[in-house]
Amino acid sequence: MPRRVFFSFHYQRDIWRVNVVRNHAKVKSGYQEAGYWDCSLWESTKRTGEIALKRLINSGLQNTSVTVVLIGTETSERKWVKYEVEKSYERGNGMLGIYIHNIKNIIGRTDLRGKNPFDSFIVEQPSRFAYMSKPQVRMSQIYPTYNWVNDGGYNNFSKWVEDAARAAGR
C-alpha cells in the first residue's frame, strides 16, 4: 500500500530539483508502483498570513505517515521548513532527508550542499525502559539522510519512505 508523504522544501530556490524527486513516480507508471502519494503543499503565495500558512501546513500533514525534507543549499534556514519538521515530529511521522543539490537544474547546474535541517532540533531519544532518563539527541542522530543522485534515489525512494514509516511504527 502506498504511503502518504509530505514533502518539505525551500520553494523559491529548489523547485526544479524538488520536482525531479516528486515527479519521479510518474515515470514509474504512477503512485502504486512508486510506493507513495505526494501530499505536500505548493508554497504558492506570499500574501497568505502566518496563521493561514500554519493551518495550510497542518492540513497538508493530516493523514500522512512520512515527511521527506528535500535538502537544498538554504533549506535548513527556512522558517516554514522548521515548522513542518516540528509538526511532523509532534505527529509522530517517520522522517528522512534527501540532499538534492546534485540534481542539475534547468540549465544543467548543480548547487552547494546545504546543512542538515535535523541538526537544528534537539529531542529526547525514546527509551525502551520507563525508569531510565531519556538522553537528548539531535534529530540528525535519529532520522537518516540520503543523497538523491549518489544513493540512487530514483530506485530507492520508496524503500526509504517505507523504512521511515516502519521506524516510526506507522
Image (cartoon, rainbow, N blue to C red):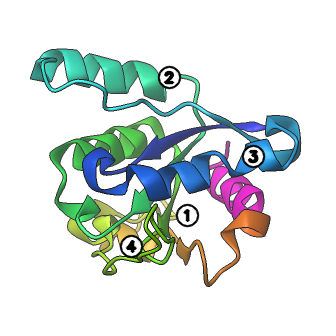
First in sequence: mark 3 vs mark 1: 3
Circle number at residue 128 = 1
Left or right: residue 59 versus residue 93 is left
The residue stretch that appears in magenta: 157-170
1 or 4: mark nearer the eye = 4
Kindly identify which residue carries mark 3: 25
Circle 1 packing at 10 Å, graded few (<14), some (14-19), many (20+), is few
Marks 3 and 4 in Cβ contact (< 8 Å): no
Main secondary structure found in the magenta portion = helix
- Which circle's residue, 2 or 4, is located before the other in the chain? 2
Image spot of residue 80 (x, y percent): 23, 41
Disc 2, disc 3: CB below 8 Å?
A: no
Where residue 122 sits, quadrant-wise, is bottom left
Q: Amino acid at mark 4?
A: Ser
Where is residue 139 shown, x and y percent of the image?
A: 36, 66
Q: Foreground residue, 81 or 113?
A: 113
Give the crowd class for mark 3: few <14, some 14-19, many >=20 residues within 10 Å.
many
* Residue 170 screen position, x and y as percent: 67, 42
Of residues 138 and 99, the one drawn nearer to the viewer in this rendering: 99
Q: Dot 1 lies on which element?
A: loop
Picture residue at 45% right of the left edge, 24% below the top: 60
Residue for point 42% across, 30% down: 41
The quarter of the image holding the N terminus is top right
* Three-letter residue code for mark 2: Gln
How far apart are the two marked residues, 3 and 4, measured between alpha carbons?
27 Å
Tag 2 residue: 62
Q: Tell me the mark number nearer the camera, choosing from 3 and 4.
A: 3
Label 3 to label 1: alpha-carbon separation: 37 Å
The residue beneath circle 4 is 140
Residue 72 picture location, percent across and down: 35, 66
Residue type beneath disc 1: Arg
